[in-house]
Amino acid sequence: MLKNNSFAFEQQYVCEICGEAITNPLCPVCLTTEINAWLTLYPDLRKELIPKLQKYLKRVKEDITNSTQCIKCKNKRASICPYCFTAYVLGELKKLNINKIILKEFLEFFNFRNELPIPVKKEDYHF
Ligand SMILES: [Zn+2]
Ligand SMILES: [Zn+2]
C-alpha cells in the first residue's frame, strides 16, 4: 500500500519568538496599523511609540524569508505571532511609563490570547 504523504507538505509555520504554531496569522505590519489607529487617541504616546515599532518592523522584514500569509494583507510576513508582537509592544509601553488606564485599554484591544482572556472588572470603569 502506497502511503500518501501529501500531509507532510503542508508546512506549519511557527512563531520565531515563542515557537508555537501561528494559528491566527496577523502580521506585525497590520498590527502596527491598528495600534497606530488606536494611538490617534493619544498623540503624545504615538510620537514615542510608533518610531520604535517601525524600527522593530524593519528588522522583522529583513529577517523574513518565507513565512505565514497574513490573514489581512496577504503578505507572507507573519513570522511572529500576534501574541508575541503585542507582548513586545506592551513591554515598550511599560518602558514609557504610560498610565494604567491606557495600558489596560491596549490589552483589551489587542488581546489575542483568547484562551486566557484578561478579566475586566466593572469597578475599573468610572461611569
Ligand atoms: Zn509567538
Ligand atoms: Zn498583514
Image: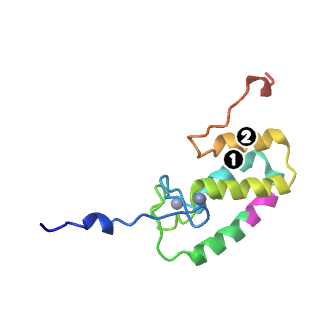
- Ligand 1 resides in the quarter of the picture at bottom right
What residue is disc 1 on? Answer: 38
- The colour style of the image is rainbow
Label 1 C-beta lies within 8 Å of the nearest ligand 2 atom:
no
| Residue in front for this viewpoint, 67 or 98 | 67
Q: In the displayed structure, does residue 36 sit left or right of residue 82?
A: right
* Residue 54 vertical placement versus 88 (above, below): below
| Residue in front for this viewpoint, 40 or 111 | 111
* Quadrant of the rendering where the N terminus is positioned: bottom left
* Quadrant of the rendering where the C terminus is positioned: top right
What's drawn in magenta, residue-wise?
Answer: 47-52
Position of residue 35 measured from the top left corner of the image (x, y, whole percent): 67, 52
* Label 2 crowd bin: few (<14), some (14–19), many (20+), radius 10 Å: few
The answer to whether mark 2 and mark 1 are in CB contact below 8 A is yes
Helix, strand or loop at label 1? It is: helix
Looking at this view, name the residue that lies furthest to the left.
1
Position of residue 113 measured from the top left corner of the image (x, y, whole percent): 59, 45
Name the residue at 63% across, 57% down.
84
Amino acid type of the residue tagged 2 in the rendering: Glu
Number of callouts in the render? Answer: 2
Main secondary structure found in the magenta portion:
helix
What residue is disc 2 on? Answer: 105
